[in-house]
Image: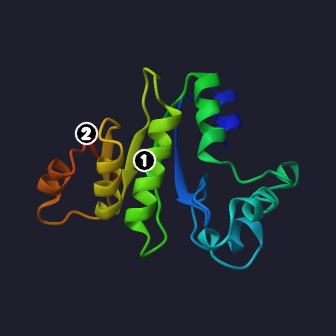
Amino acid sequence: AFRLGAQHGFKAFECDVKVSADGVAFLLHDTELKRTTGEPGTAEELTWTELSRLDAGRWHSPEHVGEPIPTLSDIARFCFDTGSDLNIEIKPTPGRDVHTGELVASEAARLWLGQSRLPLLSSFSTSALEAARAAAPDLPRALLLEEWSPGWFEQAQSLGCVGVVMDHTM
């Protein structure tokens, strides 16, 4: 998707990032592996070595068979090579919000160290954003909202967010 987007001239991308059992930040939307890899189980229960062997392209189309799950490091290199911006959605497995927020933010800060264009860290999880802020206070953050709720603005301010992201219909 990133390569195709770049071929069409796009210069900004969004991805969901999770953490493997052994602490590697990788891209995956779902908590379960079944839809995108055909494998049973929860992604965060596997080590990166196990995850790296899965086919994440077969579900999409024949021309993508064999596409591996990318790491955050892979996508950082892509962004540097193409001059692209990135919104990293911290997407923790339920109950792993703080751990995921800390690790993803720390890894992003390490990868983008010395870069003039930093990634945006976003999440629906305020706990993950709090942890990200503590781990990498210089990286910008955004609160994701599924619906308006009282105190949303104050919550975004307290997390030091530079933005609030929601569905355009809101």
Q: Position of residue 135 (x, y in %)?
A: 35, 48
Residue occupying the far front of the picture: 22
Dots 2 and 1: beta carbons under 8 Å?
Answer: no
Whether residue 170 is visible here, answered yes or no, is no
Of the residues under marks 2 and 1, which one precedes in the sequence?
1
Q: Position of residue 162 (x, y in %)?
A: 25, 39
Depth check, mark 2 against mark 1: the one in front is 1
Q: How many residues crowd mark 1 within 10 Å: few (<14), some (14–19), many (20+)?
A: many
On screen, residue 39 versus residue 15, left or right, reads right
| Observer-nearest of 1 and 82 | 82
Q: Position of residue 66 (x, y in %)?
A: 86, 53
On screen, residue 40 versus residue 145, left or right, reads right
Q: Hey, which quadrant is residue 129 in on the image?
A: bottom left
Say above or below: 58 vs 135: below
Q: Secondary structure at mark 1?
A: helix
On screen, residue 52 versus residue 133, left or right, reads right
Disc 2 target residue: 162
Query: Which quadrant of the figure contains the C terminus?
Result: bottom left
Say above or below: 126 vs 163: below
Query: Which quadrant of the figure contains the N terminus?
Result: top right
Q: Amino acid at mark 1?
A: Ala
Q: Which mark is on residue 105?
A: 1
| Observer-nearest of 4 and 27 | 27
Kindly report the distance in space between the C-alpha atoms of the residues bearing marks 2 and 1: 16 Å
On screen, residue 170 versus residue 28, left or right, reads left
Say above or below: 103 vs 33: above
Q: Secondary structure at mark 2?
A: loop
Q: Amino acid at mark 2?
A: Val
